[in-house]
Image (cartoon, grey):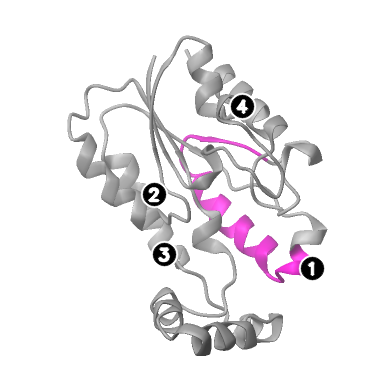
Amino acid sequence: MRILVFSDSLSLPRSHPETCLHEQTWPELLRKKGHEVCLSAIGGATVKDLLKQTFYFQDRRYFDLVIVQCGIVDCAPRFAKRWELKILQSLGKFGSWGMKLLNRKSIRNLRKLTYTSEKNYREGIQRLENAFDAPVVFVEILPASSSYETQLPGVSKNIEAFNTILRSHRHISMKDIPSNGIMSDHHHLSAEGHAYLADRILNQLP
């Protein structure tokens, strides 16, 4: 099959906090099974960022299947909006000091910010589905462990809310991913997690 993948960093190799090599990533595992895979991945991408990439794939008839993996960047609790971060980052040492001061659980709990609202995420997912003639399959956001919830209070609730949106479309559930499938940063796939997701995808292919 000719498969187009839109993703944030979860489809990419990593060197930290643990190592996952390029050949161990799930798009590469699909290639090894004989599928033609075109990967459009942006680290730190929101659904809005991925929508902009559809411009480069305007021959919508070429692909047999589109797989989309994004959501944790959209739904994770934040202490600042993106434009606020850009301002802080432009202030050099003063901005770095400000980010350290503001990046606290109490500030995140007070502001209750995410990069993407549920409404905008729902609309973005629908627009991605409508952008192609081929079937579009969405990969659920990885479930939050108790450690992740302790580190980032509210992330479990947000993940469940955004996954509920994905479940109204054709999707791949990740709720049963084994604990060793997620890196110690709580939101990236380990080599075992990439293998797990590749198997889930292959089981859904015609």
x, y percent for residue 180: 79, 38
Q: Earlier in the sequence, mark 1 or mark 4?
A: 4
In the drawing, does residue 106 fall left or right of residue 37? Answer: right
Circle 2 Cα neighbour tier, 10 Å, few/some/many (<14 / 14–19 / ≥20):
many
Asked if one can make out residue 205 in the rendered structure from this viewpoint, the answer is: no
Query: SS for tag 2?
Result: helix
x, y percent for residue 195: 66, 26
* Residue 153, image quadrant: bottom right
For the residues bearing labels 1 and 4, Cβ distance under 8 angstroms? no
Residue at 35% across / 55% down in the picture?
49
Asked if one can make out residue 179 in the rendered structure from this viewpoint, the answer is: yes
Q: Name the residue tied to disc 3.
A: 119
Q: Earlier in the sequence, mark 3 or mark 1?
A: 3
Residue at 31% across / 50% down in the picture?
51
Residue at 51% across / 19% down in the picture?
30
Q: Name the residue tied to disc 1.
A: 150
Q: Name the residue tied to disc 4.
A: 24
> From this viewpoint, which residue is outermost toward the front?
93
Q: Earlier in the sequence, mark 4 or mark 3?
A: 4
- Camera-side mark, 1 or 2: 1
Query: SS for tag 1?
Result: helix
Q: Name the residue tied to disc 2.
A: 125
Q: Earlier in the sequence, mark 4 or mark 2?
A: 4
Q: Is residue 37 magenta?
A: no
Q: Earlier in the sequence, mark 3 or mark 2?
A: 3
Q: Which residues are magenta?
A: 149-174
Which amino acid does the dot numbered 4 rest on?
Gln
* Residue 99, image quadrant: bottom right
Which amino acid does the dot numbered 2 rest on?
Ile
In the drawing, does residue 37 fall left or right of residue 168? Answer: left
Spatial CA span between label 1 and label 4: 30 Å
